[in-house]
Image (spheres, grey):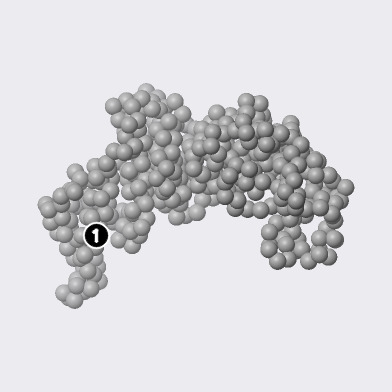
């Protein structure tokens, strides 16, 4: 029995990155031996164990054989006779197929260190094409390592394209697709994930609502010649650079889905796209089973980003309506996140990344002023029932009218 450190821990150490997860591979052991040593088994499809003290994961070396469609269509052999090289052969990328023993010695049978030096994401073997989830994983690693200069090897991209065209991706569960996509959104360059999926044909299969933005023209005076997909990718890239929450990045990703349903004879204009985007966005969220709070934030950015852009022109009554429709009174943090998403739409254009966005500060200050109208004062004045709401709205309207007269941007 011998234990190796494998996968991301070895890769990240060799790259000089912070090691977060430590996965271990056990060669020459059986399930019974692991249990006898106090490990607790957690794997269902194949034997994975938690260390009795550290609770880190230890997996038995295994081989796998394709038996069906999709991510789960495999049989596994985790017998004690499976060698280290056999286990590493089944892994996705060469940079993830390096093992380190307890003496610090590396086993690298498939050129992982060479590809680390060359900044290449390359598949280990042709068996890569048997697992459709690897299309998403490679795209996610590309998003994680793009800032270090990593690119996908041409032969690996070709296999990703074959997988996308094979029908295998359709057998991935919504949960797995969303899990990989959510993780990709948190990476330093999330736009690379979606660009690669588009490049290999997977975007049309997994995120057709987003794929419909590709090559859709926009008015050049506002978007500098970028099509709707390119604009979205630039806005998403800026969202990551600004360190915005992953939920805001998703909202930025989906804010212009309505442009994907604009009839071609209306291009490059997209009148009403903010409302047209509600249906495809709702469909996408339902299919991938997104959390409700993520969906709701994305819908707000989609529906209201044009109104937010024009905030300084809005009448007090329209401001009041905006606050009511977005539930800004009860959910000010979500309202602030919505404004961040709208700002990224404005800045996600050539030479606009550093452009000031006065609407954000203006609306936050307007909301603060309107919130100074206290409900208890309305009740104390003798209003009851529905009249409380009406009087509260009237007083807030007065506060917004006064705010609009006196507001001066710094």
**Left or right position of 324 against 234:** left
Is residue 227 visible to us here? Answer: yes
Quarter holding residue 29:
bottom right
Q: Residue 307 in the image: x percent, y percent?
A: 27, 44
**Left or right position of 37 against 395:** right
Quarter holding residue 262:
top left
Quarter holding residue 393:
bottom left
Is residue 251 visible to us here? Answer: no
Looking at the rendered structure, the secondary structure element under dot 1 is helix
| Residue linked to disc 1 | 368
Q: Quadrant of the N terminus?
A: bottom right
Q: Nearer the viewer, residue 283 or 223?
A: 223
Instruction: Please count the marks in the image.
Output: 1
User: Dot 1 surroundings within 10 Å: few (below 14), some, or many (20 or more)?
Assistant: some
Q: Residue furthest right?
A: 81
Point 60% across, 51% down: residue: 19
Point 23% across, 55% down: residue: 365
Point 32% across, 25% down: residue: 220
Q: Nearer the viewer, residue 261 or 228?
A: 228
Q: Nearer the viewer, residue 312 or 279?
A: 312
Q: Nearer the viewer, residue 165 or 353?
A: 353
Q: Residue 303 in the image: x percent, y percent?
A: 35, 44
Q: Residue 221 in the image: x percent, y percent?
A: 28, 27
Q: Residue 326 in the image: x percent, y percent?
A: 33, 54
Q: Is residue 108 above or below residue 159?
A: below
**Left or right position of 197 against 129:** left
Point 37% across, 45% down: residue: 341
């Amino acid at each position: 029995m011998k234990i190796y450190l494998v996968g991301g821990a070895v890769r990240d150490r060799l790259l000089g990155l912070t090691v977060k997860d430590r996965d271990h591979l056990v060669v020459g052991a059986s399930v019974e031996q692991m249990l006898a040593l106090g490990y607790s088994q957690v794997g269902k499809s194949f034997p994975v164990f938690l260390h009795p003290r550290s609770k880190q994961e230890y997996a038995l070396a295994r081989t796998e054989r394709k038996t069906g469609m999709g991510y789960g269509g495999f049989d596994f052999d985790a017998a004690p006779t499976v060698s280290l090289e056999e286990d590493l052969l089944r892994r996705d990328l060469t940079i993830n197929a390096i093992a380190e023993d307890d003496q610090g010695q590396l086993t690298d049978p498939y050129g992982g260190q060479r590809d680390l030096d060359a900044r290449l994401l390359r598949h280990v073997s042709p068996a890569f094409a048997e697992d459709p989830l690897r299309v998403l994983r490679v795209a996610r690693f590309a998003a994680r390592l793009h800032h270090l200069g990593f690119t996908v090897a041409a032969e690996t991209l070709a296999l990703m394209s074959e997988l996308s065209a094979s029908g295998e991706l359709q057998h991935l569960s919504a949960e797995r697709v969303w899990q990989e996509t959510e993780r990709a959104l948190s990476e330093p360059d999330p736009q690379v994930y979606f660009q690669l999926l588009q490049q290999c044909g997977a975007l049309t299969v997994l995120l057709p609502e987003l794929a419909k933005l590709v090559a859709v023209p926009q008015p050049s005076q506002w978007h500098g010649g970028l099509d709707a997909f390119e604009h979205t990718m630039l806005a998403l890239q800026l969202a990551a650079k600004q360190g915005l929450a992953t939920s805001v990045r998703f909202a930025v990703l989906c804010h212009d889905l309505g442009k994907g349903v604009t009839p071609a004879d209306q291009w490059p204009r997209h009148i009403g796209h903010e409302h047209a985007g509600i249906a495809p966005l709702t469909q996408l969220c339902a299919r991938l089973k997104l959390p409700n709070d993520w969906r709701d934030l994305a819908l707000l950015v989609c529906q209201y980003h044009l109104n937010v852009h024009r905030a300084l022109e809005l009448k007090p009554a329209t401001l009041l309506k905006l606050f009511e429709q977005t539930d800004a009174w009860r959910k000010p943090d979500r309202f602030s996140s919505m404004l961040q998403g709208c700002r990224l739409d404005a800045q996600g254009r050539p030479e606009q990344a550093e452009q000031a966005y006065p609407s954000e500060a203006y609306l936050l200050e307007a909301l603060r002023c309107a919130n100074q109208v206290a409900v208890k004062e309305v009740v104390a004045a003798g209003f009851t029932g529905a009249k409380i709401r009406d009087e509260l709205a009237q007083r807030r309207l007065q506060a917004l009218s006064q705010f609009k007269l006196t507001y001066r941007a710094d």
